[in-house]
Amino acid sequence: MRYIYLLLAGLLACANVGAQELKRMEPELSDYIPLLKRAGYEVFPFDISSLKGESYDILFTTKEYEKGEFKRDVPPSILFPSERIPSYDKITIGFSPAADSLRMATLSVDGVSSLRKLVLRPVDGPVMSGRYLYETRPFEVGAFQPDVFIPLLLIGSFWFDSGGYRFCGEAEFPADMSSKTFEHLPHYYVIGITLKKQE
């Protein structure tokens, strides 16, 4: 009888070891996201499926600011006519790694895309002078009005303050751009859309 108990105990021990075994897995696409982000690739999708059945032209616009003051619309604005896009699902804004003073933005609507070149500026301050330090942050989105600019994404420069470089502020900026953070940003771009109702 004791022999049977010892045999059962041994079998249970083997079963437990097998249950705790580590196994190698094939990587999934989501496993690459942290690596891509660290390398400078970023993607921000926005759901616009509620526009299905409506006829809106989508006007992509990039606005440039200095120290909280509007400087200019970066030409050219990009128009996505609704007849080219029969069913709206999402807007995607993506960034590739910065190369010196340039960063490329890709603006896409359901597979139709266009590139935008963003000229960066070196940070102003000691130690890191001549380096380009930028951060991307989304805006809060929700209900919209036709023919009104809707900010979607900000890419802005760090600033030097109290002995260090920083980019503080909200994780999502308010759509009315009322955040005090904008007063500190030396240079930034706001990428957004205007939805134009077709007659």
Image (cartoon, grey):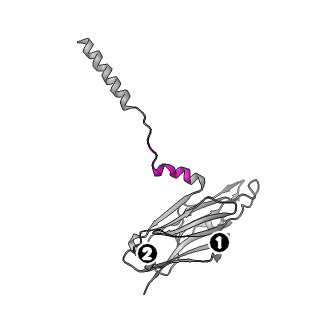
Image quadrant containing the N terminus: top left
The residue that disc 1 covers is 65
- Please give the name of the residue rendered at 56% of the width and 54% of the height, measured from the top-left corner: 37
Q: Position of residue 126 (x, y in %)?
A: 76, 56
What element does badge 2 sit on? loop
Label 1 CA crowd tier, 10 Å (few <14, some 14–19, many 20+): some
Q: Is residue 48 above or below residue 162?
A: below
Mark 2 vs mark 1: give the one in front: 2
The residue that disc 2 covers is 85
- Please give the name of the residue rendered at 43% of the width and 80% of the height, measured from the top-left corner: 83
Q: Position of residue 149 (x, y in %)?
A: 53, 77
Q: Which residues are magenta?
A: 25-36
Q: Is residue 11 visible?
A: yes
Image quadrant containing the C terminus: bottom left
Q: Earlier in the sequence, mark 2 or mark 1?
A: 1
Question: Do labels 2 and 1 touch, CB within 8 Å?
Answer: no
What type is the residue that disc 1 sits on?
A: Tyr
The question of residue 30 being in magenta is answered with: yes
Side (left or right) of 67 relative to 107: right
The question of residue 45 being in magenta is answered with: no
- Please give the name of the residue rendered at 37% of the width and 29% of the height, measured from the top-left corner: 18
Residue 8 is drawn in which quadrant? top left
